[in-house]
Amino acid sequence: MGKRVIQETKYLYTPSLIGRQEEAKYKHQDIPAYRDNPFIEALPPIFEDQHVILNIAKYPDYNDEQRKLSKQVRLHLVQQIADYVEPLPSQLLVEQRLSRLIRHGYRARSPFAAESIRQFNIGFKNILEAGVDSTGMNLAGVRSTAAGFAILGVSGQGKTTAIESSLLLYPQVIHHVSYKEQPFIRKQLAWLKLNCPFDGSLKGLCLNFLQAMDSHLGTNYFQKFASTRSSVDILIPIMAHLATLHGIGVLVIDEIQNLSFMKSGGAERMLNYFTQLINTIGVPVILIGTFKAMRLLSGSFSQARRSTGQGDLIMDRLTEGEEWSYFIESLWKYQWTAKSSPLTDSIKKTMYDLSQGIVDIAVKLYMLAQWEAMEAEDSKGERITVGLLKSVAKQHMQLVQPLLKILRRNDPELLSLVDDLYPEWNVLDQFLKKSEERVNLQGEIRSKINREEKLEYDQDIYIELIKTAIDFGGSSKDAEEIVRMLMQSSEAEKDIVDLRKKVVEMVSSLAAAEKGNETMSSVIEKTNETTSKTKKMREPSVNLDEDDLRNAAKVTKGADEIYVNLVGMGSIPSSDDISKLIV
């Protein structure tokens, strides 16, 4: 037996997530459709948002008195930031969808229903081959209530953290003994999370599934069913059989972008199998991956997401503004330097620039900056400055700098080279069009989609502004072009009064420029510059942040002195730094 199993060791399984096990305690269900089903009644109550926030948040153990501890101790305390989790709206959406997905999926899978029992007699090979009829019933008469959805997004933005935090709110294994005075000895697997095999093969997934079942349930399915003679066609019905027997509430497959490395047709075959699990067997499936997986999921898996009421979730980088401010202000509280470094506007902006709104990079940068400040031991007294942040990013985060530089430049041709960090817009467009359910967009990608679709959402404003342009002397053609370009620019976020004023300014500017060869875009640009200059002239003088570059020239006149000040602030390289670059 050992010889035939060991040949499959290239598909080694390492549990990526292990949950708790508990004895079944059945709870009254307020929703009638959830009653008389032990798989549902054994689950925890439906969680309120406040409960989710309190339980998924991971905050470091911190108080100001810890600043007085020795440097070596504080260096260890900073390490806590690596596990920091700040609940964001996208994470609440994930838990809400998971909650509905598991319970609704179980509705058609009561272990006492005659149809569910009949499946074991018919055999899952026959059930899978027959598929479902026109009413959605499989060969045993089970009409699936399961659904599936995908979570896609930029690497390091918390997709895996969001789903794992939500899964861990539920017990993974529930031990049943009796239900309503009837013997019911069953180990229920409320959730199972697997990583897509490195080679993206369906057989690798099936073998990992068997290993996972053994790991969590204490069974020996892998030894019983896995061998070199076990083809995919044999393993798939076994997988469906076990998923039904142990009442898997949801199957989560992470790193789904690995499918893109498969041979022709392989990805489609695996996605078709997930569709079978959902539509024929009734097991909900959640797929997680980077933007690279978007092209794959536009096809086969879309059939399993139809009419789910859940919709896919796309998690992109945080936007610079209210979203970023909330995150960075929450993170900045956890600081163990000897002296407190306030979060200035310039530091907030620099942190965004150096991380491009990617949560994982921002957290690591902040952690590295504190270590660097403690080790510096200079006259600044362990302070976090703009110069220090830039120095840390340059020295200790070199691997990600090329990618961040591409994101910073926002060049479409370059961005297409980093499909894990940025979606191909034509693929995203097709993905959104093929999705019958509403796709929830989070972060930077939401603002860009909204900008491009502004005309569709604000037709009333669009028409009103065209009327304004015509009333003030613009032709119909010019009016339409002015308003279209205005609403696709950043000015579109203003209210209707400001937009009317802007339209009037642009119509007047266009009339004055008719004798020249100026384009419409140059007229808009000049109008924006005039508005910006006027605003700056009206702004009162303000106290500059300590790291503000304008401080370098505030009380000096000579260029040499300004240069020295900028070097001291860490904003430009010194002559020594430059000399090191000369070969």
Image (cartoon, helix red, strand yellow):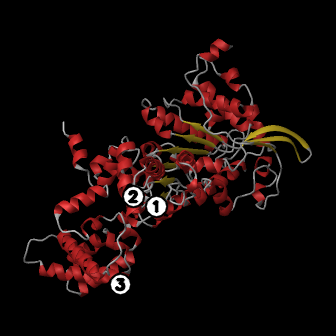
Question: In which quadrant of the rendered view does residue 243 lie?
Answer: top right
Q: Determine whether label 2 and label 3 are within 8 Å by CB.
A: no
Q: Quadrant of the N terminus?
A: top right
Numbered circle sitting on residue 105:
none
Residue carrying label 2: 385
Residue lying at the far left in this picture: please name it.
Answer: 515
Which structural element holds mark 2? loop
Q: Which residue matches tag 3?
A: 497
Amino acid residing under circle 3:
Val
Residue 441, compared with residue 81, is above or below; it is below
Above or below, comparing residue 570 to residue 298 in the picture: below
User: Which three-letter amino acid code belongs to the residue tagged 1?
Assistant: Ser
Q: Which residue is mark 1?
A: 341
Image marks 2 and 1: residues in contact by CB distance under 8 Å: yes
Q: Residue at x 45, y 64 (%)?
A: 343
N-term mark: 2 or 3? 2
Please tell me how crowded label 1 is: few (under 14), some (14-19), or many (20+) other residues with Cα within 10 Å.
some
Mark found first going from the N terminus, 1 or 3: 1
